[in-house]
């Protein structure tokens, strides 16, 4: 469920018509709904409540949507943060997430990033390889500190979905094998600079079936039991993110309540604290990208291009993962209006800058507004300034108010970031 609905004849975010934001802020523009963010987080949190030892840590995956106002909205509800860089840790802290709710993951954390995480005192550094374990132990020892770590395990499970976002197969770059995890956990337990608090996994993103997750969690359970049998303490099991969302034309993914029931079945009696790293399921349907039609290019040969002012630099998912985003006219036409098939494209100089081919849409004309739905996760965060197009601004709505929470940079600001080499 989300809070983008037609009201008084046009698409609105909560109480604010999208056209009002488009007029005031310009297009393309990302628009986020506070009510949807809050709803998705509380539904997830409430579904997981009571699972495992103590209250589960719900560490929102910052990479999905890292706008500070989005983070603060979630932090105010008690969300932690799953981060993958020093920058993301800094964002989480700036938004008020306490260090004891921050998890740091990633296959290639630099020594500076590890040192920073130790200084901040994050809840858990997810160690993804033996060289990283050794480097972290040295950095912690130099500081006279003890880093709280989890070993990120690659459970060798195929999660389905797009190959570019599957992470849990043995040939993916993430984590270590079950056997390695056992050895490294024991090694870390004997190291004065490290305190292993648990084990972690994350098998992919946009997962629409519980089966691969259940298979992975079963393997993680067995690992926890083996570690405990060796006399090692395992306080936390971090189950990662990955729960998919409906992108309009796909099978309905499992609800958080189904996910929770599966966890109760698989891990219910394990007596371990649980952590989750949901990103997409919180943010995707809480945001849209609003764009204006530049013109319609009707080829005499029959092809019809809908040329928008948004491009692959603003929303790269269709170009990168062949992802489907529903496109809705901001002013829906009459029910009997003609529908036409459009190739929906942006202005960037690449054929890959195509959002959809042959998409049936009501007849549109220059100046009309459209909204890319489900663009709140991995939309703005993956944006770039390719073709020297300014980053799309971000707007947060709450009831009948809205605020620009990241302005569009001016061309002057963009050019000023690049000092000329002194010899030029
Ligand atoms: N935890 C870890 C360690 C991750 O690598 C990820 C996502 C998450 C949590 C959050 O997963 P989620 O709940 O959002 O599925 N850019 C791609 C998605 C990349 C996901 C990367 N890792 C896309 O637009 O589909």
Image: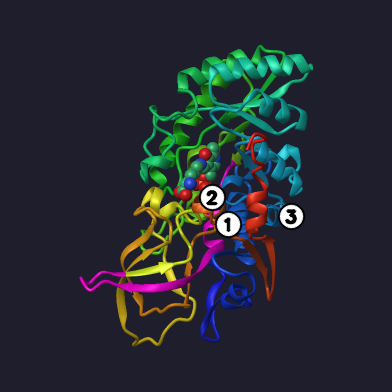
In the image, which disc is placed on residue 390? 1
Colouring scheme, one of rainbow, by chain, secondary structure, one colour: rainbow
Q: Note whether residue 242 is visible.
A: no
The single residue placed furthest to the right in the displayed view is 144
Residue occupying image coordinates x 43% and y 42% = 165
Numbered disc 1: secondary structure:
loop
Is 126 above or below relative to 58?
Answer: above
Distance from mark 2 CB to nearest ligand 1 atom below 8 Å:
no
Precedes in sequence: disc 3 or disc 1: 3
Residue 180 is tagged as none
Q: Which residues fall within the magenta stretch?
A: 276-304
- At label 2, counting other C-alpha atoms closer than 10 Å, the crowd grade (few under 14, some 14-19, many 20 or more) is some
Along the line of sight, the residue nearer the viewer: 305 or 322: 305
Mark 2 or mark 1: whose residue is earlier in sequence: 2
| Mark 2 vs 3, N-terminal side | 3
Q: Is mark 3 within 8 Å of ligand 1?
A: no
């Amino acid at each position: 469920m989300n809070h983008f609905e037609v009201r008084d004849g046009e698409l609105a975010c909560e109480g604010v018509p999208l056209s009002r934001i488009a007029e005031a802020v310009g297009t393309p523009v990302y628009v986020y709904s506070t009510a949807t963010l809050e709803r998705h987080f509380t539904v997830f949190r409430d579904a997981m409540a009571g699972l495992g030892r103590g209250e589960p840590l719900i560490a929102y995956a910052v990479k999905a949507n890292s706008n500070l106002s989005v983070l603060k909205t979630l932090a105010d509800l008690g969300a932690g943060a799953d981060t993958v860089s020093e920058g993301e840790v800094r964002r989480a802290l700036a938004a008020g997430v306490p260090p004891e709710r921050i998890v740091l993951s990633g296959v290639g954390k630099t020594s500076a990033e590890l040192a920073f995480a130790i200084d901040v005192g994050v809840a858990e550094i997810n160690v993804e390889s033996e060289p990283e374990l050794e480097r972290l132990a040295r950095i912690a020892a130099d500081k006279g500190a003890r880093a709280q770590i989890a070993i990120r395990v690659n459970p060798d499970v195929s999660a389905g979905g797009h190959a570019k976002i599957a992470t849990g197969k043995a040939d993916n770059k993430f984590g270590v094998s079950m056997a390695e995890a056992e050895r490294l956990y024991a090694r870390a337990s004997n190291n004065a600079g490290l305190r292993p608090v648990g084990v972690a996994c994350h098998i992919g993103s946009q997962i629409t079936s519980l089966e691969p997750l259940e298979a992975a969690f079963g393997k993680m359970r067995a690992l926890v039991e083996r570690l405990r049998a060796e006399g090692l303490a395992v306080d936390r099991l971090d189950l990662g993110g990955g729960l998919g969302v409906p992108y309009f034309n796909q099978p309905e993914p499992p609800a958080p309540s189904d996910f929770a029931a599966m966890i109760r079945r698989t891990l219910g009696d394990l007596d371990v604290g649980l952590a989750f790293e949901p990103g997409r399921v919180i943010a995707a349907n809480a945001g849209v990208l609003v764009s204006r039609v530049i013109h319609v290019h009707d080829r005499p040969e029959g092809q019809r291009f809908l040329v928008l002012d948004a491009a692959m630099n603003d929303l790269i998912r269709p170009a990168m993962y062949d992802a489907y985003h529903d496109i809705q006219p901001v002013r829906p036409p009459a029910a009997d209006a003609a529908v036409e098939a459009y190739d929906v494209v942006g202005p960037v100089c690449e054929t890959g800058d195509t959002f959809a081919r042959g998409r049936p849409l009501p007849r549109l004309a220059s100046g009309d507004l459209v909204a890319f739905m489900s663009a709140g996760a991995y939309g703005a965060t993956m944006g770039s300034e390719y073709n020297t197009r300014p980053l799309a601004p971000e707007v947060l709505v709450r009831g009948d108010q809205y605020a620009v929470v990241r302005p569009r940079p001016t061309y002057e600001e963009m050019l000023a970031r690049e000092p000329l080499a002194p010899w030029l």
